């Protein structure tokens, strides 16, 4: 099990760096960011992570009126996003209907300051880091993210504890404004979507709960996303975490068009924090948009920013990574965090922690009280279920996985597969490894497979299927997925053993080659049992194998739902 693993030393510290770039952060151009607090601000060291949520009932049982209403709206998470929908073009989503809906509801998004986050990867993690930092400082924070794991309420967290909004509050607010939403749906000829209506409800919750600041994650792209109704006067700053090829067709077909779409969240005169490292032409697009809008740019890859991942160690059955972060920039934007214990694993999560730290310093530069202690505590307390999550012995045992370690991660892009592969190599080393994979149909399946096969070679790969947002129309079939993985294995020079389709009378094959097989229409608990059986003969007797469930947050969610029964 995990607690038997020795510390894994990182031979070469990782650091973020890029060629020197001019800093655009003149504080005298920025209106102050102020909140009205008493002199003694209570410190809350609450865990934002939803890793240990209490048992959650189904959303339909909790909020029947709301869920029934949302089910009757167009759900692009289920049916897929149309080509060009996230671009500034005639094909793009109409932000006007979102503004009109919010206008009917009294413009709730105008009642608080917001931090708006876009990017291909890292949005949810950066949102969690920032939310935790601010909650540790005593602020009342609203956080809006997507997708969710177990209940749609997870998308909206509020207050200093960071718990999901209660079913009672969300449903009651919906019933109070249902008539106005009905009017909007009718006037827009039924064009309002599931995401648009729920985003409006999230803003309504934040307004009702009088949050001090909202951390808002864009759903798709940026420019035409339903969250992009936040005006300059309501924005603290925006963050663009990364630029990758996910949702390529919906965002214009190229990395350049994706960068243009995501830079749409930059607002006139308000700072933008950018992650990276980004390709020079991609960073240029973002900087040019910022310059056009007189928006100061703060780069997490600035020469004054450094970070290193020192080692992994195991705390309370779960690995943590020991890191250093140092920032020294203009305008007294300085911090030195040595020996950070991050629960969020991987170099990519260190990048996200650096971005969140830059964001916290940006808030401090605007006049908000954000102490170094709160920054450290917020970063260390943050963990997200389904993201590089190692289950405890008790959790694994509850689903019948007594003799293996179990890792769940919703990775579904080439970049996130690389991060997952690096963590497996660092934490699990040479123990037997099985991958359980299902994916949505619109992902880059070959690049994802090739990346995972290029790192720590798995002993077993089981391909399955998953429902996406309640339906299977967006899920690639397990057979098609296996064909792609076999081609990727051939491409990286791995000779595999094709076990074809798993049958109830499974016999463990006598082979040292990696075993590939299909597990269609099989409960996730049973698939893990199959994976465990297939790897039990691969290692030494005192070695516990690792089963990693990945490829889709929806697949991970199906496993987490068992833990919360």
Image: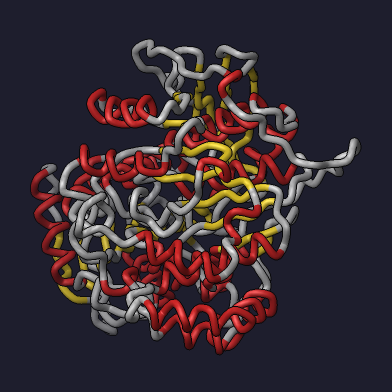
**Residue at 30% in and 61% down:** 93
**Spot occupied by residue 88 in the image (x, y as percentages of width and height):** 26, 49
**Spot occupied by residue 326 in the image (x, y as percentages of width and height):** 58, 18
**Spot occupied by residue 256 in the image (x, y as percentages of width and height):** 21, 37
183 sits left or right of 208 in the view:
left
Placement of 253 over or under 24, stated as above or below = below
559 sits left or right of 488 in the view:
right
Placement of 93 over or under 415, stated as above or below = below
Placement of 82 over or under 364, stated as above or below = below
**Residue at 51% in and 54% down:** 389
Q: Which quarter of the figure has residue 392?
A: bottom right
**Residue at 64% in and 81% down:** 176
Q: Is residue 514 visible?
A: no
Q: Which of 246 and 117 is in front in this view?
A: 117
Q: Which of 5 and 190 is in front in this view?
A: 190
Placement of 525 over or under 202, stated as above or below = below
Q: Is residue 426 visible?
A: yes
Q: Which quarter of the figure has residue 75?
A: bottom left
**Residue at 49% in and 65% down:** 199
**Spot occupied by residue 481 in the image (x, y as percentages of width and height):** 18, 65
């Amino acid at each position: 099990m995990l607690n038997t693993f020795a510390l894994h030393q990182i031979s070469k510290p990782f650091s973020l760096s890029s060629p020197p770039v001019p800093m655009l952060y003149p504080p005298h151009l920025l209106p102050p960011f102020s909140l009205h607090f008493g002199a003694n601000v209570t410190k809350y060291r609450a865990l934002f992570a939803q890793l240990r949520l209490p048992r959650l009932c189904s959303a339909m049982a909790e909020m029947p009126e709301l869920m029934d209403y949302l089910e009757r709206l167009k759900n692009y998470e289920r049916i897929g996003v149309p080509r060009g929908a996230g671009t500034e073009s005639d094909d793009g989503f109409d932000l006007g209907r979102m503004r009109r809906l919010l206008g009917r509801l009294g413009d709730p998004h105008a009642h608080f300051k917001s931090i708006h986050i876009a990017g291909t990867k890292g949005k949810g993690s950066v949102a969690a880091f920032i939310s935790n930092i601010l909650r540790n400082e005593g602020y009342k924070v609203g956080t809006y993210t997507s997708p969710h794991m177990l209940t749609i309420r997870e998308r909206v967290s509020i207050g200093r504890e960071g718990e999901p909004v209660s079913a009672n509050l969300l449903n009651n607010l919906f019933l109070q404004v249902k008539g106005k939403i009905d009017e909007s749906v009718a006037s827009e000829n039924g064009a309002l979507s599931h995401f648009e209506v729920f985003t409006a409800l999230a803003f309504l919750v934040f307004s009702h709960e009088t949050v001090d600041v909202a951390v808002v994650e864009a759903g798709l792209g940026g420019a035409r996303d339903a969250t992009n109704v936040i005006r300059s006067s309501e924005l603290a700053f925006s963050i663009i975490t990364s630029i990758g090829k996910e949702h390529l067709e919906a965002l214009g077909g190229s990395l350049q068009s994706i960068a243009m779409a995501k830079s749409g969240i930059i607002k006139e005169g308000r700072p933008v924090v950018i992650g990276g490292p980004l390709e020079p032409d991609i960073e240029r697009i973002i900087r040019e948009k910022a310059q056009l809008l007189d928006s100061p740019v703060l780069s997490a890859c600035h020469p004054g920013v450094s970070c290193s991942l020192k080692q992994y160690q195991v705390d309370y059955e779960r690995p943590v990574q020991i890191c250093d972060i140092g920032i020294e920039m203009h305008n007294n934007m300085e911090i030195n965090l040595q020996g950070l214990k991050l629960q969020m694993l991987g170099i990519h999560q260190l990048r996200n922690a650096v971005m969140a730290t830059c964001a916290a310093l940006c808030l401090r530069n605007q006049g908000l009280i954000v102490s170094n202690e709160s920054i450290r505590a917020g970063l260390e307390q943050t963990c997200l279920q389904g993201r590089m999550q190692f289950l405890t012995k008790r959790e694994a045992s509850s689903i019948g996985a007594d003799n293996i370690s179990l890792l769940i991660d919703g990775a579904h892009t080439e970049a996130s597969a690389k991060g997952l592969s690096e963590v497996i190599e660092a934490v699990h080393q040479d123990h037997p490894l099985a991958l359980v994979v299902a994916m949505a149909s619109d992902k880059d399946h070959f690049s994802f497979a090739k990346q995972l096969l290029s790192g720590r070679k798995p002993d077993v790969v089981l391909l399955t299927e998953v429902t996406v947002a309640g339906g299977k129309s967006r899920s690639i079939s397990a057979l098609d997925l296996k064909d792609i993985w076999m081609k990727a294995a051939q491409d990286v020079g791995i000779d595999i053993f094709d076990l074809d389709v798993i049958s109830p009378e499974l016999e463990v094959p006598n082979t040292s080659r990696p075993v590939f097989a299909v597990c269609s229409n099989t409960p996730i608990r049973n698939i893990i049992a199959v994976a465990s059986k297939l790897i039990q003969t691969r290692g030494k007797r005192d070695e516990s194998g690792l089963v990693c469930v990945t490829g889709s947050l929806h697949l991970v969610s199906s496993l987490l739902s068992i833990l919360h029964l």
